Amino acid sequence: MGKEKFGVAVDEEIVQEVDELVAECDDLGASRSEIVEAILTAFVQSESNHAERVREIIIRKRKGTL
């Protein structure tokens, strides 16, 4: 399976969290990109209703309740 690159802009708080995960996975030599891909993989492979969950997150972020 091939990979495709795309750019995303994220809040600084998320960047800090991802950087903390990078530091915690230092023994693996994991990059930010690899960490984000792992998070997305876990989300997509979960049993939840992805569209519903994404909509909920977007709405909460726009309302400032997340």
Image (tube, helix red, strand yellow):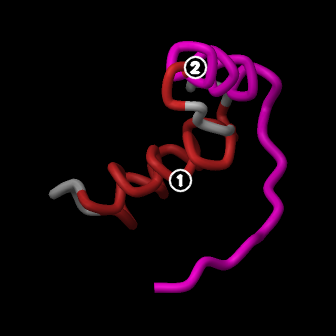
Q: Is residue 59 visible?
A: no
Is 20 placed above or below 33 here? above
SS label for mark 2 = helix
Indicate the position of residue 41 as horizontal and vertical percent values: 39, 57
Is 15 placed above or below 44 here? above
In-image side of 41 versus 25 (left or right) = left
Indicate the position of residue 59 as horizontal and vertical percent values: 57, 46
Q: In the image, what residue occupies the spot 46% across and 53% down? A: 40
Badge 1: residue crowd in 10 Å (few <14, some 14–19, many ≥20): few
Residue type at the position of mark 1: Glu
Q: In the image, what residue occupies the spot 56% across and 26% down? A: 66
Residue that mark 1 sits on: 37
Residue type at the position of mark 2: Asp
The quarter in which the N terminus is drawn is: bottom left
Q: Which residues are magenta?
A: 1-25
Q: In the image, what residue occupies the spot 58% across and 36% down? A: 30
Residue that mark 2 sits on: 26
Would you identify the image quadrant in which residue 10 lies?
Answer: top right
Say whether disc 2 or disc 1 marks the residue closer to the N-terminus: 2
Q: Nearer the viewer, mark 2 or mark 1?
A: 2
Residue located farthest toward the left when viewing the structure as drawn: 47
In-image side of 35 versus 5 (left or right) = left
Q: Give the CA distance from mark 2 to mark 1.
A: 16 Å
SS label for mark 1 = helix
User: Residue 46 in magenta?
Assistant: no
Residue 54 is labelled as none
Q: In the image, what residue occupies the spot 50% across and 30% down? A: 28
Indicate the position of residue 61 as horizontal and vertical percent values: 64, 37
Q: Is residue 14 visible?
A: yes
For the residues bearing labels 2 and 1, Cβ distance under 8 angstroms: no
